[in-house]
Amino acid sequence: MGNDPSVVAGIARWRAAFVMVFLCLLGMKLVLAATLQPFGDEAFYWQESRHLAWGYSDLPPLTAWLIRLGESIAGHGLLGMRWPFLLLGSLLPWVLVAFGRRAFDARTGWQAGLLCLCLPLAGSLGVMAIPDVPLTVAGAVAMLALLGAMDENRRRDWLLLGIALALCWMSHYRAAMFVIAGVLLLLLTPRGRAQWARGGFWLAMLIAVIGLVPLVVSNWQQHGAGVAFQLIERNPWRFHADTLVQPLEQAITCTPLLYVCLLWAAWRCWCRRRDGGPWDVVALLSLTFVVVYFAAGLFADDQRFRVHWPLPGYLPLLAALPALLREPNVVRGWQMTAKAGAGLALLAQVAGLFYLGLAAYPAGARWLGAARAIPTSFIGWRESADMARAQLADKPAILVADNFMMAAELDFQFNGQHAIYTLDSPLNVKYGRAPQVALWGMDETALRHDHPADSVLLVVDEHALRERERAAWLGSLCARVENLQPAGRVSLFDGRKSVAFYRGQVADSVLTDSKPAGDCIAWRNAIAAEE
């Protein structure tokens, strides 16, 4: 079969299609990585890279380490921060090519890689410096290594599995899902149960445990702040019916036709799991992510962006889908649906990248702003920093932001050359950053301790909090910074992004309940700006 000219030509066509799409998307991602303003979380990861540690109150250390590596080589800036993640994200489709080749054949490998490029979130991975990049890529490598280790029991595959899992643990607490998926595979399948007796498996687990060392050390140093946030503080652990829409969210994220095809592939793999490899590996790994995340999502955090969580579970299905569609008993309608789904997913991928590209440039941002379709988390930071520079040049003062995101964005724009404190906003607690800011000595307590009664330039993101929280927070600013006087405002896109500047003095203490919110000029000005 390998010498059949038609087979060789078919493989060459799929390889050419993959390389062409890969290069086109890589070019688009490179432009975005170099131009798109960082959003608040990303800027905070950059701040963490300026304080290298075993870990942080929100994350293990790998994201910060990669950002530090990037800027050490390429200098401070958007591309300097993001190029390691762009490189890692660009490796993901190649890992899927290798997975498809190992599980099935060369043609399936190139088809799996092409589907990975089409799948939103997978094909765009690496544009931003976020922990999901190393987590997803390391997880995909772990799946590839596990597939080879179970088939051939080679030490190099077990070593690769251990290293990949260690990197997962160093990327995010959600690495636990890869472990859960692996344990279920080793318990529920005949081939899986045979792995417990192999020395290579225990070698892999020993190496994987090394990745837990930074988590253990950082949580010990911070009295369990990271574990507390990820497992308790961010999760209500009670049923909320609104999260029953998760399948609809996933269908939109993956695009509907491709999502249906992936679920069909998961079901077919589950039905064939007793046939051995690779069906058992694909079925257990993919369904664990899809099913467990859905079940946990009914009780866990529903306040933060999480549609990307099941992404690793779709990756092995991208290899299984082409192989299943070639089987003789498959209804032709599935083949047509898969082709249409892949095409529409690729169009959605390109459209999404083009949309972010518009937001990255002032002219495009203005056009999107007129249509009220601008992602406000990516805009206004540069303009705010410019005004802060002008204000400080006119009259030096202690620079204070009203929440950690604003502080991180300003710090990024200033390249860490100016100390920036943050007030104790509810946003800091919501995202698990309050312990970290306190550890750095840049929170409200440190501000009052280090600069009693000093002059302050306060920068306030008036729309950072939800509507129900805004009045109480903005009304408390007069107690946190005394003698507030308006000093300027950045208002973009009909006030959808509004940043106010105030001058005042550091308060000796905070008595936020003594006066109603309406008595504070910060709240009154925010309301007036919206009228």
Image (cartoon, helix red, strand yellow):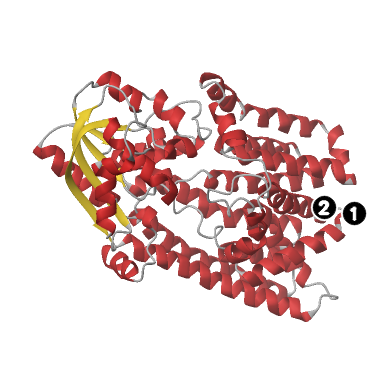
Indicate the amino acid at tag 1: Arg
Most foreground residue, 174 or 406: 406
Q: Which amino acid does label 2 sit on?
A: Asp
Q: Residue 526: x and y, percent? A: 28, 50
Q: Is residue 269 above or below residue 526?
A: below
Local secondary structure at mark 1: helix
Of marks 2 and 1, which one's residue comes earlier in the chain? 1
Residue at horizontal 70 percent and vertical 50 percent from the top: 289
Q: Is residue 169 visible?
A: no
Q: Distance between the residues labelled 2 and 1?
A: 7 Å
The residue labelled by disc 1 is: 274
Left or right: where does residue 330 sit relative to residue 240? right
Residue 529 lies in quadrant? bottom left
Q: Residue at x 42, y 45 (%)?
A: 469
**Residue 36 appears at what percent x and percent y?**
35, 56
Could you tell me which quadrant the C terminus lies in? bottom left
Q: Looking at the figure, which quarter contains the N terminus?
A: bottom right
Q: Are marks 2 and 1 in contact (CB under 8 Å)?
A: yes
Q: Which residue is drawn at 54% across and 48% down?
A: 303
